[in-house]
Amino acid sequence: MRCRKCGQTASINMHQHRLSLCKNHYNEWFIAYTKKTIEKYHLLKNGEKALVAVSGGKDSLVLWDVLNQLGYYTEGLYINLGINEVFPYSDRSQDYAQVFADKNKLNLRIFDVRAELGRDISNLVKQSQYGKNRPCSVCGIIKRHILNSVTRQHEFQIIATGHNLDDEVAVLFSNNLNWNLEQLSRQTPLLPETSDFARKIKPLCRSYERETTAYALLNGIEYIEEECPFSIGSKTNNIKTWFNQLEKDQPGIKFAYFTRFLAQKKAGFLSGVENLPIELHQCPKCGQPTTSEEFCAFCKLLDD
Ligand code: Q46
Ligand code: ZN
Ligand code: ZN
């Protein structure tokens, strides 16, 4: 297998793009491809201040690396969720994020959930009524709240997350199965900023997980390889396994499924749902905007 650009031994063969590349040409290609995604969906401009949500996993660290290589102003935020029961998942992930930041002289902000809120995800999952058997819902509410409050407090215009194509495909399929139009309408590489929320962007949404892994390995980016213990056996993981099998038989199927969905959305497939006005209120406890007329989901969860 030879690199299509220089003829040297290839480091990666991408059936989905019918392309084999050596390490140097792969790096060049991956960075240019991410830039193309940023431009195609108008995600980010030079001079804007982006906060990268860093989990210590490969995707968010690769994203931070690429945005940095492309010259964007970025800082990282690591939220230590306190998931340390089965093994020190959160603490280890934080170490990987910190090592990456130090190595690249980048600023990493840390939010320690237990220290700041007095309870961590593991406690909330065990103790709150809402949280029982719903660790990822609890985690989602906490992460959203913290990301919003850090972006407001430090005046970031943008939150960048490392969701890759495999993540997007799994979410899309799951929402497709339920025909959850509201969720489908919100699945996009860019959620525009409003007076209440920063813009949310996903620059790796067209990149296969295999591609982000290759970039991390070829560039010596160390990351936590273990998965969050709460994700084991999840519906999302099962869908990903199933799509990997499908992709083997039909290379490019994941890419087509996701990008054709985006094209249909652009053509107005979900315009009736997308344009519905959302009424927001201010949470009387924390001040963050919420669709609820009472306390927001975060405050309800902590009071539970
Ligand atoms: S960290 Fe949180 Fe994920 Fe773990 S508890 Fe679920 S949502 S699986 S990205
Ligand atoms: Zn080459
Ligand atoms: Zn609140």
Image (cartoon, grey):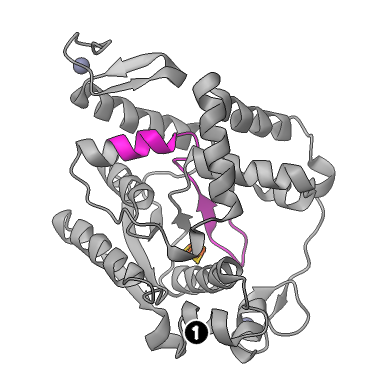
Query: Which element type, helix, strand or loop, lies under badge 1?
Result: helix
Question: What's drawn in magenta, residue-wise?
Answer: 193-214
Picture residue at 29% right of the left edge, 35% below the top = 214
Residue 106 visible from this viewpoint: no
Query: Looking at the picture, which amino acid does disc 1 mark?
Result: Asn
Q: Viewed as shown, does residue 201 lie left or right of 74?
A: right
Q: Say if the magenta span includes residue 95.
A: no
Q: Residues within 10 Å of mark 1 (few under 14, many from 20)?
A: some
Residue 223 visible from this viewpoint: yes
Classify the position of ligand 2 by quadrant: top left, top right, bottom left or bottom right: top left
Q: Viewed as shown, does residue 11 lie left or right of 229?
A: left
Picture residue at 37% right of the left edge, 52% below the top = 60
- Quarter that holds the N terminus: top left
Q: Viewed as shown, does residue 208 lie left or right of 107?
A: right
Vertical placement of 180 versus 119: above or below?
Answer: above
Residue corresponding to mark 1:
123
When asked about the image quadrant of residue 22, the answer is top left
